Image (cartoon, rainbow, N blue to C red):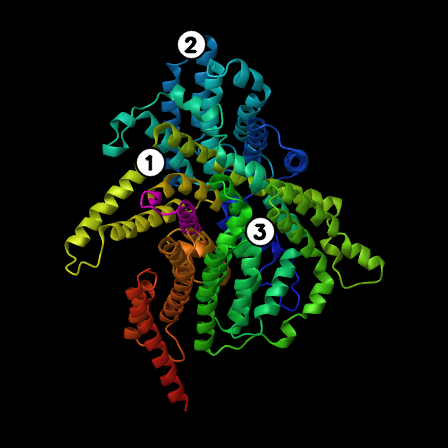
Amino acid sequence: MTKQTGQSGQSDPDLSPEQIEAMIKEYDSESNFRDLLGPVAILVTIASVALSLFHLYTAGFGLLNEVMHRTVHLAFVMGLVFLVFPRKRAAPTPAMWRSSFLFAAFYLFLIFDLLGQLPATVSSYVFIAGMVGLAIMTLPIKGRGCEPGKIALRDWLFAALGAGFSAYLAVFFKDIFIVNVGEPRPQEYMMGLIAIIVTLEATRRTMGATLAYIGAFCILYAMFGPYMPGILAHRGYGIDRIINHLFVGTEGIYGVAVGVVATYVFHFVLFGILAQMSGLGQLFIDLATIIAGRQSGGSAKVSVVSSGFFGMISGSPIANTVTTGAFTIPLMKKMGFSGRFAGAVEASASCGGQVTPPIMGASAFVMTEMLGVPYNEIILIAIIPAAFHYLAILLMVHLESKRLGLAGMSADKIPQLANVLKRSWHLLIPLAVMVTLLLMQYTPFLAAFWGILFTIGFSYIPLVAHRMGNRDMDLNTVLTPRKLMIGFEDGAKFALAIGAACACVGFLLGITTLTGLGFKFSAAVVQLAYDLAGIVTAFDFTGLLSEKSIALFFGLFFVAIACILMGAGIPTTPTYIILASIAAPALSEFGVPLIATHFFVFYFGVLADVTPPVALAAYAAAGLSRADPMRTGTTAFRLSMGKALVPFMFIYAPSLLFVDFSLVEFVLALFSGVLAILALSAAYIGFWGRELILVEKVLLTLAGLVLISNSWIAITLGTLVVLGILLRAKVSSRTEMA
């Protein structure tokens, strides 16, 4: 998403808007759009605007039936993906060749397996020959180069097939879903095979190979079930049954993942882009500067607050990192923070927006769909965990500022609240209207519909104000018809990658329901956790450790690692959908409340963006701060420790999520959580009034981790250790100053 330039009271960024856009493309594959020219650009603009208008109209005036709505959405998405996202023009690397060969071989395997299921007709053989050619075209064979802004012939072919397989279901809806329901014809199998190949290729182009590998593995798992080891084994399914399950109906490609994008995510992506174009991003930074700018290390705290604001409506932590970081990172470095720390602060804060109510990057609405819990309950539940995350970041920023002796921002850099509200009051109304409708339990897409309309309408307030003599408002934020068309086009483009990714996620969800993969994963995790717990308790001579509690800890640890690995390089929404389907059931086996399991996997999925070795948000911030990417990623992970610890806290004390609420448990968990974050923050920064020695840092770390427990004994011991070390450090620092 783009952000308005010209910050009030702040210096301009070190990078131009073009450089910022280039960095977003480099680190965020979801934003790596072609620079199209001429008739092709016009075609893409028309199709993108049409997609946005389709969603805006259906949000306000009623959705189509479930299948039809999703097929229309995906027809546009798959058709546009191959026109908007480029193939890599650089010389293919050996790794790229290996990956492409694996996928081509997989496609050929599916093609020839399907051959035995089709009638022996000329059309069947022609189709198979065409599919073989399509598989070969997926290889990175360097053909004749295209001029800039033009599209290769094979991309046109993939675009036509991508739009075609969904359009086929829409056009022949009655024949497929009513007349011949349960009895697919040969042409359905053919279109289903095209859908599988094109979806995997669209995912590879927009997201990279990781998610595509997962999708391909799921299909192979369904086919080779009898040959799987131990608990993973199942009866196995033929390619015809798999295609029918994934393509026809709402169990696979057109399942819940595409459904939430087509009814929730798309609308809030569009709202976020139009809100930014109308100046909301500028308002967020101004308000953050007023709130935090005067405090020690003000620029870093402004980064935390503004990134949290912007992250709520941004679906991409990477885009959030680059757009806000282009302004905040140079300010932090000029104030005295190291490039590594400045980049880490921005990355960690930007990822925090995904867990911050009321919007939560649209993930709140996905949770509502998957859990059947009202939206207003979801955002209430999310408040305490999000507060812990930002408490940890702000505390570490504060301690680092004190350690370096940094002051706040000068008064001339901080805008006046009255001036900000006078200039930008109208930008808060669309957001307030949308949140109010959500809290009144209107559907999310209807709330987004009115939010978008109010954003467009109220963007004209500066124009009216100018005509009435008020020259303070910025006319550049008026959403004129031309800007509105750009906003609608960008809204569709930014939803393409997540649309393709969620179609691929449909493979995993479909195969899970077909084979019971989720239950098998859960059983494997539970069995391994109890095996390790048995070993630990065998050496426990005190009798204080129970096998169930140790097994729960190991289960949480295994699921957390799986979440971080799964979330590497995959957007938040599809990551959460995958994890909620596969990993969350494992925690339910330990008696953890369902909503706590979903929040646990969601938090650790988001954490992947700042977890090395694949910490894309941190690497993007390192590019802005000119720091070492790996060290920046490590620092960002430490700054995000609140996000890593909080899930364990609310598993052991569900009252933090207002689940099975007990006031005593809630107060105790709140106290121990704050103290744990305080201890770990001081240990990581190594400062509490004075520099802490190694022994103090180690003891604070251990005590902070112990405080996560729900045991009175552990909390008491941890509290005594933390308070003792911090009081001793504070007293000795005052003595030294005296």
The majority secondary structure of the magenta stretch comes to helix
Q: Quick one: 184 or 164, which is closer to the camera?
A: 184
Q: Residue at x 56, y 24 (%)?
A: 164
Gap between marks 2 and 1 measured at Cα: 37 Å
Asked where in the image residue 234 lies, by quadrant, the reply is: top left
Q: Quick one: 337 or 542, which is closer to the camera?
A: 542
Q: Is residue 560 above or below residue 182?
A: below
* Residue assigned mark 1: 519
- Which percent across, then down, holds residue 490? 62, 43
Q: Which one is closest to the eye, mark 2 or mark 1?
A: 1
Q: Quick one: 590 or 274, which is closer to the camera?
A: 590
Residue range corresponding to the magenta coloring: 587-606
Which amino acid is tagged 2?
A: Pro
Q: Residue at x 39, y 18 (%)?
A: 114
| Numbered mark located on residue 119 in the image | 2
* Residue assigned mark 3: 313
Q: Is residue 735 above or below residue 714?
A: below
Q: Which one is closest to the eye, mark 2 or mark 3?
A: 3
| Numbered mark located on residue 628 in the image | none
